[in-house]
Amino acid sequence: MVDRRQVLNFRVHAQQLDRSAGTLADTAVLDIGVQNTGPDGARWALAVRGVDVTALSDTEVVLLWTVRGAPHLYRRADVGTVAAAVEPFSDADAGKRIYDASRPLKAAGIGNLAALDEVAARMRAVVTRPTVKGDVSGRLATMLPEPYLRSCRPCDATHLYEMPFRLAAVRAGLELQLDTSPPILRRIAGFTKAPAPGDRLDLIRAYLRLLGPATPKQVADYLDAPVKDVKALWPRDVVEVTVDGEVRSLLAADEQALESADGTGTRLLGPYDLFLQAKDRATLVPDAARAKELWPVLGRPGAVLVDGELVGTWRPRKSGRTFTVAVHPWQRLSGATRDAITAQAEHLAAHRAVSLAGVEFAG
């Protein structure tokens, strides 16, 4: 039996949210990928784990469309192994990951993996130099037959389905140029996909190591993969623990860490921080109303993490060169906790290169 506080403390420590300094080489979340969505995306996720991101360059990191088609940051040295790690487990898995795009392919007798390979080959032929996403999509729409294409009413145009486009990019050896909007695709220099991901970058093992204990369904939901495929690849070196009446798995090597972890510190987590990506949301936030506030359909706020517990949400309010952090606490906060949150807000302001006008605490 393991209570939820042990689980949260374990994740805080595993994800290094309790440290003050670190490097790209020793930052564990880069093994699973750091989602880069919104202004407080991958760089801020690294900054709250003690990494100095002021001089972060694309010689050290690489931005790829990977899990769930979202852009994720990785160590550049790992790029070939990452490509192996994010490969769909099967044709059925590929079909699940590309959503509605699989239906016309199936009707045309085209396998999902074969379709991704076809798109990847065409993309690599198109992207011989840095190219804006829209231009790549436009070229592909003239090169691929109807089962690959969809009619887009807002654009009044025909496009490639979005998920095959995104998931084929890594197969094509393409990366996203940092800090470009709209995204610019370019070839990865010297790209070669590794034959296997190895234990460190294996996504199932990485999920258990960073977001465990977990069930196969929770890992499958994170990856948008079929539970059957995840179960077939489930690690053998796991132990079973019971969390909130549910039997879950943990890597045996992490059993002692689960028992002894003490997640201390205060952090302002970005809306898509890995800590908030766990698929056992009721463990993270047992109260349904608070969960709805933290994970709305649109416009997610950030989360306030204090000593292993999520204690509220926050949103930035920017005006010119200054901004305010608006905090909505879920409980009464001590003066020391408010001071720690303010210190984190000052860290965020410095990270954004703006002046902090203040922190507003609701209630």
Image (cartoon, rainbow, N blue to C red):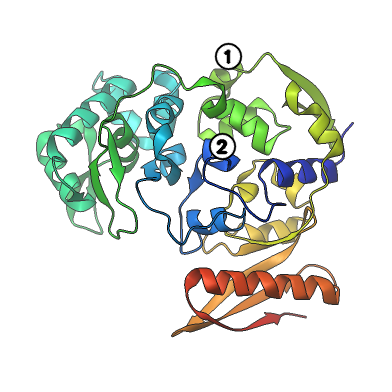
Q: CA distance from mark 1 to mark 2?
A: 16 Å
Which residue position is annotated with label 2?
Answer: 222
The amino acid type, in three-letter code, at marker 2 is Tyr
| Most foreground residue, 88 or 32 | 32
Residue 187 vertical position relative to residue 327 in the rendered view, above or below: above
The amino acid type, in three-letter code, at marker 1 is Ala
Q: In the rendered view, does 4 fall on the left or right side of 141?
A: right
Residue 113, given in percent of the width and then of the height, sits at: 32, 22
Which residue position is annotated with label 1?
Answer: 232
Kindly check if marks 1 and 2 are in contact, taking CB atoms under 8 A apart as contact. no
SS category of the residue bearing label 2? helix
Q: Which mark is residue 168?
A: none
Residue 329, given in percent of the width and then of the height, sits at: 76, 71
- Residue at 18% over, 48% down: 130
Q: In the rendered view, does 153 fall on the left or right side of 7?
A: left
Residue 240, given in percent of the width and then of the height, sits at: 79, 22
Instruction: Farthest residue to the left: give it.
Output: 142
- Residue at 23% over, 22% down: 108
